[in-house]
Amino acid sequence: MIERSAIRPAAAPARSRPTSRVACAAPAVGEIWLVGEQERSELALVLADVWEHGDDEGLPGRYVSAVLLGRERWWQTSLEMRLLAAESTLGEELLVEWRSQGPVPAASFRLRVGRLSGPGHSLVARALAGDWEEGRFGAPLQSASDPRLAGIRSAEKRLRRLLASACAQARAGACE
């Protein structure tokens, strides 16, 4: 189980360097993007600036720290934070799915669809700093038979699909 204290933007590896020149549109902190393949796009919130891996560090390329956004409140647990409609330019309630937070290849970011408003940006920044607004989170899982586990498995499957697609794009140099 992931603890809230472990939720931080994915830091660039020590040998990575921030990039100032990106061939594709560069996602910026607080923006909401469609990521992944067209037929299976996901909403993602950008948590940190783009960084670049070198050729000797595994998968080379540009990466962004992001977290998936969801809409299904029925499975909200203690790791999903509710954003109110006024806290983004999308004008609808969203869930920040903290368990899905991590580095995503910059080439996966297809279309900027919105951004956090001032209060939304402040809420996410406070959460990343460990200042949790408790009324924004669901109840912890109660048991192995908790029905919300189905939603969590669905979110994990979405994340695996996104990362597999993103890695394939990174290998192919889709944004070079």
Image (cartoon, helix red, strand yellow):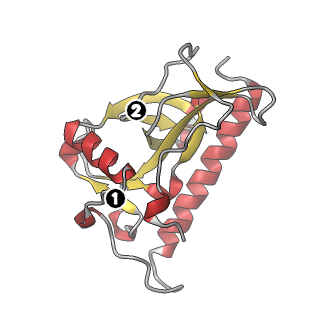
Q: Is residue 26 left or right of residue 135?
A: right
Q: Amino acid at mark 2?
A: Val
Q: Mark 1 sits on what residue?
A: 81
**Above or below — where is 139 with respect to 63?**
below
The residue beneath circle 2 is: 29
Where, quadrant-wise, is the C terminus in this rendering? top right
Place of residue 48 in the rendered image (x, y in percent of width and height, measured from the top left):
46, 35
Of the pair 23 and 162, the residue shown nearer to us:
23
Which quadrant would residue 165 be assigned to in this image? top right
Question: Helix, strand, or loop for circle 1?
Answer: strand
Give me the C-alpha separation between circle 2 and circle 1: 18 Å
Quarter placement of the N terminus: bottom right
Question: From the viewer's perspective, is residue 105 above or below residue 138?
Answer: above
Which residue appears at 41% of the width and 28% of the height?
112
* Left or right: where 67 falls relative to 167: left
Residue 77 location in percent, x, y? 39, 70
The crowd level at tag 1 (other Cα within 10 Å; few <14, some 14-19, many 20+) is many
Mark 2 crowd level (few <14, some 14–19, many ≥20, 10 Å Cα): some
Q: Position of residue 21 (x, y in %)?
A: 56, 13
**Residue 156's disc number:** none
Numbered label tally: 2
Place residue 55 in its image quadrant: top right
User: The residue under label 1 is which amino acid type?
Assistant: Met
Residue 171 percent location from the top left of the image: 76, 31
Mark sitting earlier along the chain (2/1): 2
**Foreground residue, 131 or 42?**
131
Measuring 56% from the left and 47% from the top, which residue is drawn there?
102
